[in-house]
Image (cartoon, rainbow, N blue to C red):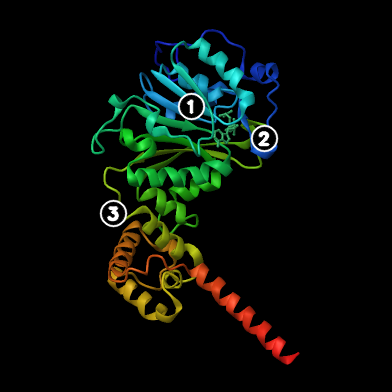
Amino acid sequence: MAASGKVAAFRLPPLPTVKEIIKLFNLRAQKQLSQNFLLDLRLTDKIARQAGKLKDSHVCEVGPGPGGITRSILNADVAQLLLVEKDTRFIPGLQMLSEAAPGKVHIVHGDILTYKMERAFPKHLQKKWEDDPPNVHIIGNLPFSVSTPLIIRWLENVSNRDGPFVYGRTQMTLTFQKEVAERLTATTGSKQRSRLSIMAQYLCTVQNRFTIPGRAFVPKPEVDVSVVHFTPLVQPKIQQPFKLVEKVVKSVFQFRRKYCWRGVEILFPEAERLEKSEQMLMLADVDPTLRPAQLSILHFKNLCNAYRKMCDEDASLFSYNYREELKQKKRTRKKGHLEQSERED
Ligand code: SAM
């Protein structure tokens, strides 16, 4: 019986346990790489089940390490499993799993941040964006330092329908530090509402499925871990380029405890800041005294549409960078001080 209670058509033959593999290949977790392993196969089965029906599907597992989740994915009777692992020490153990599931596993020793997933799976798997999600899944328990930049990159890929999303609305089941998972799924008005909440939720249905206590990992991390499931939306809730949405959302959350107009202001050069930010908030019909966390996705949609309109009217506006202006001002001030003290000498 499979852990889900259904009869599975495929089961891995008897193999050394994950713990034995770790011992056999001397796979001590490297703290500087934030490696924390899952050895309990009931938990890894539970993670794999969050992806949905995996039978006959094509899966990319990112950061398989000693292969706990890998076994659960294989036991779900997938058609093809692509493993992308950066640390060479894990390759022999993964090869052992590959031999136990002949013809199913393809191992890539590489970095998921540079791996081109658009060429990884057969073309015939491609579905139209409007159709149901394709039979392609991404599953992974990655270090937290990788999973956050990676999800931002994959969200941009969702927006552009490229990378892993050339196959259609590829679903992702990924682990995050519990607090990050809470931010990804935070609703309007909640304490955890942040840039990540808007960026993820305007493009995907995001569900925080369950939390794994830190003590379930070896070695035990300082934090708990949550499993988050993403399904790209047929229609993004904001229909503007990803970089534009990212700029507006980042600016608004720059001053998360202040009124939202404070963040809107920094989208504009100092000389026209007051006038333009008022214009943008008016166009978007957003109350300037709302706090960033109180803004709904609809508010952000209106803000992005208003900012887009203003960028269309002033071609130089989108390239304006508040931080650069601050740096420039600092440099000019410093130069002024130097010149003054030279004159005084
Ligand atoms: N999935 C395994 C488990 O749950 O026991 C290992 C989890 S461990 C937290 C993260 C794994 O991701 C390690 O095997 C690590 O070498 C790998 N990894 C880290 N950064 C990576 C990257 N950029 N690309 C691919 N793999 C990476």
How much space separates mark 2 and mark 3, taking CA atoms? 42 Å
Point out the frontmost of discs 2 and 3: 3
For label 2, being within 8 Å of ligand 1 is answered: no
Image: 154 above or below 338: above
Q: Quick one: SS at disc 2?
A: loop
Residue found at x 44% / y 65%: 252
Question: Mark 1 = which residue?
Answer: 46
Q: Quick one: SS at disc 3?
A: loop
Image: 230 above or below 319: above
Image: 71 above or below 234: above
Point out the image quarter for the C terminus.
bottom right
Mark 1 is on which residue type?
Lys
Mark 3 is on which residue type?
Gln
Q: Nearer the viewer, residue 109 or 144?
A: 109
Question: Mark 3 = which residue?
Answer: 239
Mark 2 is on which residue type?
Lys
For label 3, being within 8 Å of ligand 1 is answered: no
**Within 10 angstroms of label 1, few (less than 14), some, or many (20 or more) residues?**
some
- Tell whether 67 sits left or right of 26: left
**Within 10 angstroms of label 2, few (less than 14), some, or many (20 or more) residues?**
some
How much space separates mark 1 and mark 3, taking CA atoms? 35 Å
- Farthest-out residue, right: 345
Q: Quadrant of residue 110?
A: top right
Question: Mark 2 = which residue?
Answer: 220
